[in-house]
Amino acid sequence: MGITITRRTFMKVAAATGAAAALSSTSAMTALAATEEPQGADVKRVRTCCRGCGKMECGVWVTVANGRAVKIEGDESAFQSQGNCCTKSQASLQACYHPSRLYHPMKRTNEKGEGDPGWVRITWDEAYQIMHEKFTELANKYDGSSMFGMGGTSRIWSMAPYGALGTAMGGSNNKYTPNQVCKGPRWYATGMVSSNAFSFMATVDRPRVYVQWGGSGELSNYDDSCRTVVDCASTADTYISVDPRKTNVGHEADIWNNVFPGTDAVLALSWASVIIENDLYDPIYVKKWMDAPFLVCQDIEPSGWTLPGRSSYDIKTRLLKESDVQEGGSPQRFMVWDSIGNRLTYFDSETGLWEGETWTPTTEGREAQQQLPPGVAQGFVPEVSGFTVEDGFATEIDPAIFGEFEVTLKDGRTSTVRPVWEYYREVCAEYAPEKATEICGVAPEKIEAAAKAYATRVDPSTGYGNGGIQYMLAVEHAGNCVQNCRTIDALTAITGNYDTPAGMRGPTTFNFDGELVGSMPDVFGAGPRSDLPQIGKGKFPLYDTYAPQWSDAETLMEAAHTGEPYPIVGGFCMSGDFMSMGNSLYNWEALKGFDFWVVADLWLTPTAGAADIVLPVWHWLEVNSPRKSQGSSGAAGATCRAVEPPADCRWDPVITIGLFKVQGIPWSPGEGDEQWPDWEGVCDSVLRGTGKTWAQFAEDFQKDGWIDCKKENPEDWGMYRRYQTGALNSGKPGYPTPSGKHELWSLVMESTYEDGRYNLPTFIDPPQSIRSKPELYNDYPYTMTTGRRIPVYFHSEHRQLPWCREHWTCPRVEINPNMAKRLGIEQGDWCWIESPSGKIRQVADLYYGIQDGVINCEHQWWLPEINAAGRGFELVGINCLVDRTAQDPCVGTSNLRAYPVNIYKATPENCPNGNVIPIGYDGQEMIHDSSDPRLKEWLPDYEIRKEA
């Protein structure tokens, strides 16, 4: 008799046994590049933090034999990754000892173009002298802002382009940083309406309902480790996947909302409509901590006050204020209708208090009630604070969120006013399920099922919701990112999932002095400052009121081509690339025209192909650096050196500090060389708040493992509902927004756009959708999405690692088999993908998990095997198809997906010189087969480190 077990039950059992296995040894993969472990007495294990991926802090052990790293496996103390060690982590052994890695500073000797740059080795002193002379020359000839720092996906320690590099290049105000397309829009949106970066969800708390929206973290340790994502999906009572394609773990979803690319806001508003109409919202949070009861008065001119801060500007709003109904009244007191007293009352954003409220931080509560991994602290959940006398109110009130009310203005006129909630409700009703389906493509019954499952509390006795929403990069890439993020943020808020267990918690707090090591000097204000405005101002109104941290990448590259609004002539790239946003072909031409360009990296990347100077950096196996969770994982630890750095390689912050020194700009306080610390001095500076030196902290970490920040920081990270304690708003209850509330009606947006178009979370059609530009679909009838995660790659990384490349040799385009049959495309065929802006080739991968009419391409491909300056990016890189002028109207984020393309089979007749397989500038075919002998040329070279 067979055992009867459901697939979902099997997943839960597998998750438990898988976690147990992860806590034991994880063997390195055996592949063509496998090597025998050295034997000898000098064997040690180093506890450290992997950087084979992007933002996640996966704890690993590195085994070192005779000074050589031979094995990487999961660290059982790392509760945030649970002993996980993925393919990319293990392949780091090959990156560290790669023969094509940069080992010395080099300078170009040939003209810029597609051919060989003619690199020659130079010393660090020569490199610094050249940089000093050229950066000074260009700053004097043009201005410091004629140069910029270019960054990449964070390695924590390669973040100088986000701040310090501008200071070292004549005080430039410009930064080309991928947070414009990667998490930045989420942080920016939440910064406007709630608290910065509260787009992070505490999946480590294990939500009862897990919503994975536009991402596949099970394949790439990004916001969370692969292990955590799989556990959430398999152990949650309900798992909901929102994605145009069926993701790997999405096959196990209870509900799949297969949203059409670029229409995420429609779906989010539709969920909200269901939640509101079924009374599934959290009434206390909506009324007390959101601006939902604030009254909108259409009969007054917008007015307010000047808001100081990162961008001082005037708040101008039609929300009813005390100054509108009373002479001498405060413009910061927002009027609300009290349903109990049948009268106006107010909330004072300056004090953070309601009329008649006496506030003290909440101390009553209880421990959270989550199913957590062993040893992880639950955290403290304060009791809900309402509007009663027991909550500190002189008399009980009940702010109205429904209805309309007649008020008398200070000039004697009467006006009918309505709460913000009514306006939000109306916007959501425009996208009720039966209407939303026409745009987003999700069946009405599936929308309703998902919304009810998310908002209906599995265990009401906890007093909090089922969890947040793990929304990822897809919502930021369709040319409507800020409003997309606001619609999803509002969903999590109205259901009571803000700063609650498994909810939206923001960045982990711990007593490090800054998490981005080396991004900014310890001495602020030193060095020159440019008077030219940040690129993007004038084009995007928000850059003048609530300026983002980045310059607009598209305008920056356009300025490099045209000299307008002022010339862009060079800069410094640190572990970044030009292929992440905008049109790659256009950006490449800009880089080739620069007067002076420096790149610090592990490899000769396409971006390095346009450089005048290249600088070699440490691999993560060679780095010492404090580490803290960027997201809500709540872990603190360190990356600890496993092997000695080779040859002339240097740590990114030390490279930046060396540039400061040659430019005569102090990095740290002190006299003489104290002003320019070494790597240990940098780490000591970050650890000041812990009371430990780097040596002490690293020793404790090796012995005790990862720190649970809930335990070590109980008054902040160990405390939920911090909007009740004052921890989020400089000691006042509420949020650090202009209104002091979690805003549905954004005062920043209203003060920026007089027509009110973005006051509320709304849907903006992608700039190249079938509705926005139907004429494009005559020649480009299919919609392209991209950005899916690949088990062996991370964005543009790892294409030269044999273990990775032999598993995934070519870029693939997913296409529905029915669509492929009509087009005469078969599995494995090379295909042309074409847009009005460019064309490239990828290999067909037939998949029923992508709907007919949509294709899914892979991003950030380049070909290290191609011996040309651009390394073949133009052959296979999907961002060669991007319309560089299609941008988010608020912050300029590139429209990287959800745009029209054509796809057809590549044949000898339609390919250059009859070569169906892409061939580079050097006449070589790209690697497209795992038996290609060139893969063996990339095997680790252990002697080259000694020779170098």
Image (spheres, rainbow, N blue to C red):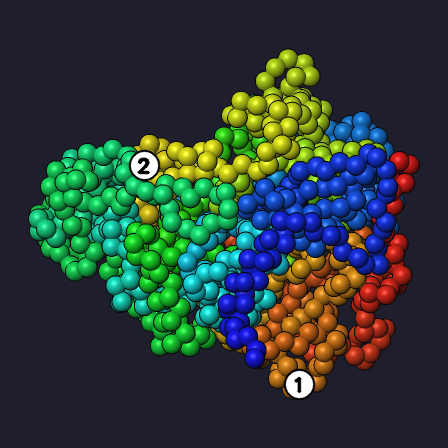
Q: Which mark is residue 342?
A: none
Residue 441 location in percent, x, y? 46, 75
Instruction: Tell me the amino acid under the disc marked 1.
Output: Lys
In the image, farthest residue toward the bottom: 822
Residue 645 location in percent, x, y? 78, 34
Residue 773 shows in this picture? no
When the figure is inspected, residue 90 is found, relative to residue 511, above or below; the finding is below
Marks 2, 1: nearer the viewer: 2
Q: Which residue is painted at 29% across and 54% down in the image? A: 461
Residue 918 shows in this picture? yes
Instruction: Tell me the amino acid under the disc marked 2.
Output: Thr
Near-viewer residue (206 or 795): 206
Near-viewer residue (317 or 928): 928
Left or right of 188, for residue 281: left
In the picture, the quarter occupied by the C terminus is top right
Residue at numbered disc 2: 725
